[in-house]
Image (spheres, rainbow, N blue to C red):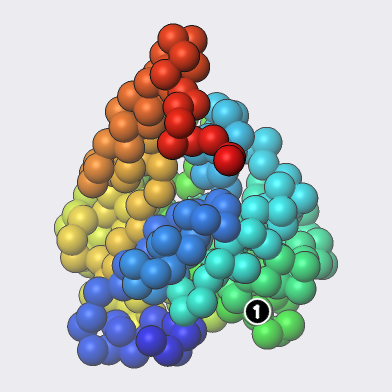
Amino acid sequence: MPKVTTRTFLERKRAGEKIAMLTAYDYPTARLIDEAGVDAILVGDSLGMAVMGHDDTLSVTMDDMVHHTRMVSRAAQNAMVVADLPFLSYQVNAEEALRNAGRLVSEAGAKAVKLEGGAAQWGTAIRSILNAGIPVMGHIGLTPQSVHRLGGYRVQGKTPEDRARLLGEAQSLQDAGCFALVLECMPPDLGAAITQDLEIPTIGIGAGAGCDGQILVMHDMLGWGRTRFTKTFVDVRAAMAEAFGAYVNEVRTGGFPDGEHEYQ
Ligand code: KIV
């Protein structure tokens, strides 16, 4: 299978073929996800909640992102690795945004970066990252780095004003040069309307079936966490809990190790 690039994203949209993305944060899981044939793996700052035990994404640092993106990049053979720019890594000024995006590419092997919000706020940062040759994915709707301003994790674009704002933000991010957009947590008709308006693909998470692709947080779709909108495809949490319990029980009762699990 050929390596997925930003060009593949555009071709998929033009051909009407759906794009499948998942998050990953470590080597063995990223390897399985890559082998399953996903188009792109996002090293999301959902890392903070899914893996690091934080209540939100705001405490995730650039060093955290570099560390986890490196593991995922080593695993990805065909999928494109996109890494999140964490809170305060692009908001201060365009120079810092470029330096931090550059770290995710040069130190960690990402092929693109993602940031949250519209081009009215981050247009200069986006252009400076693009000028250095790094593709940028946008992210609008529910933007978790702004959770306090939004007043919680709630559905966006429900009023006519908010809907118009999101349609405008999507267009401005395309004009600024983003190669794709994540649409998070909005009514499906708005997800579909934004998708129809744009030439670049939209990747939805809780934004309906009208998007050009979908993304889920890996821990959530495995029933191993609950950080975002999801469907549970398998409950690994129950299987893991059962295995951990069986191990503790066998160690305590002398059932493990048995003759089969010893060196001769
Ligand atoms: O941080 C993340 O994992 C994300 C996706 C859920 C879109 O931003």
Give whichever of 217, 94 is nearer the camera. 217
Q: Identify the residue shown where x is 48% and y is 63%.
A: 31
Q: Amino acid at mark 1?
A: Ile
Q: Identify the residue shown where x is 23% and y is 80%.
A: 17
Q: Residue 146 falls in which quadrant of the image?
A: top right
Count of numbered tags = 1
Instruction: Residue 174 in the image: state x and y as whole percent.
Output: 46, 77
Q: Is residue 156 visible?
A: yes
Give whichever of 24, 16 is nearer the camera. 24
Position of residue 38 relative to residue 164, above or below, is below
Instruction: Residue 113 in the image: state x and y as whole percent.
Output: 60, 67
Position of residue 89 relative to residue 192, above or below, is above
Q: Residue 189 falls in which quadrant of the image?
A: bottom left
**Residue under numbered circle 1:** 134
Position of residue 158 relative to residue 112, above or below, is above
Instruction: Residue 126 in the image: state x and y as whole percent.
Output: 64, 71
